[in-house]
Image (cartoon, rainbow, N blue to C red):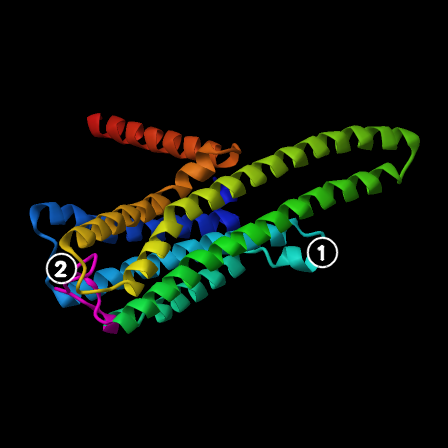
Amino acid sequence: MGNLRLNPCAYLFLISSLTNMISITFGLSTRILSGWNMNFTDSNTLMCKFRAFVMLTSRTTSFWLIAFATIDRWFSSCCQYQRRQMSSLKNAQRGTIIIIILSILLYSQILYCYEANITSTPLKCYGKSAECRLLTDIIYALITILFPLLIMCIFGLMTISNIRQTYYVILFKRTNTGSDNENKRTLVLTNRQRERWKKIDRYLRHVLLVQTILLTVFTLPQVIEKIYTTLTANPRKSSLHNTIDKFIYNFVLLLTYVASGMPFYIYTLSGGSIFRNALRNLFRSMFSFTTNTSVRTTE
């Protein structure tokens, strides 16, 4: 647990999880209230703007933090000392602040574009004009979804390549220096290290593959549907056509909340023991804390 607190990659995962919670809270709470006809964002313009702004900003921040964590993993796996120095908690904190500020500036247009009580759109709280909808769709598709996914793929593969190069360099250096007895000992050590590097390699490859595929599956359909809805906006559509469009839009919208809630399961269940051990330690510390508290209360 202590090591994870100082790990820049774990820090980025933590902040990303918090922003995902904000996105889920602001996104799903209003949909739950709409079941009792209490969704005030459909009728109140101020709440409509604020909800859309917070939800899109937090989702963009979360995706870019995960992409930044992939870049941090690449820095930490580089052979060059100067690049490894770039992987630090201080740089992760600076990058987090920059990402949050840029995400806020990027979606500041929501405060102008979004209005409540709009008809002939998938949601009543939506862009008030075709230009606003197209601008929001392009920003969401490129900046929020596609660019982070592309960065995850590129730097994830580069990280795996760095790891392979590292354990081959270690093996070459240690087997060509020192005495014969020392070489034998180091050869045993390097064989163990090679197995460890291979295990990490498989873990990173597995996590990268699962993460990229699931994020693509759960977020790309909404990008396609938003652009399709904006480009085919036609007031002369039949009621059946409008109903089908709204159903598809709401379905792919719910998939994006699945994407916001799945990073925890990716990092704890799809491979590797570091996060699982940290989770067990957290539960144990919480259990011991509650036990000690109850004992003190009874005394």
Q: Which residues are magenta?
A: 112-129
Of the pair 11 and 131, the residue shown nearer to us: 131
Q: Of the residues tagged 1 and 2, which is closer to the observer?
A: 2
Of the pair 85 and 132, the residue shown nearer to us: 132
Q: Main SS of the magenta segment? A: loop
Mark 1 or 2 closer to N-term? 2
Q: Which residue is mark 1?
A: 80
Q: In the image, is residue 90 above or below residue 10?
A: below
Q: Residue at x 44, y 38 (%)?
A: 266
Q: In the image, is residue 62 above or below residue 180?
A: below
Q: Which residue is mark 2?
A: 42
Q: Residue at x 18, y 49 (%)?
A: 31
Secondary-structure class at tag 2: helix
Where residue 242 sits: x, y (%)? Answer: 19, 54
Where residue 218 sits: x, y (%)? Answer: 38, 46
Q: Residue at x 31, y 47 (%)?
A: 257
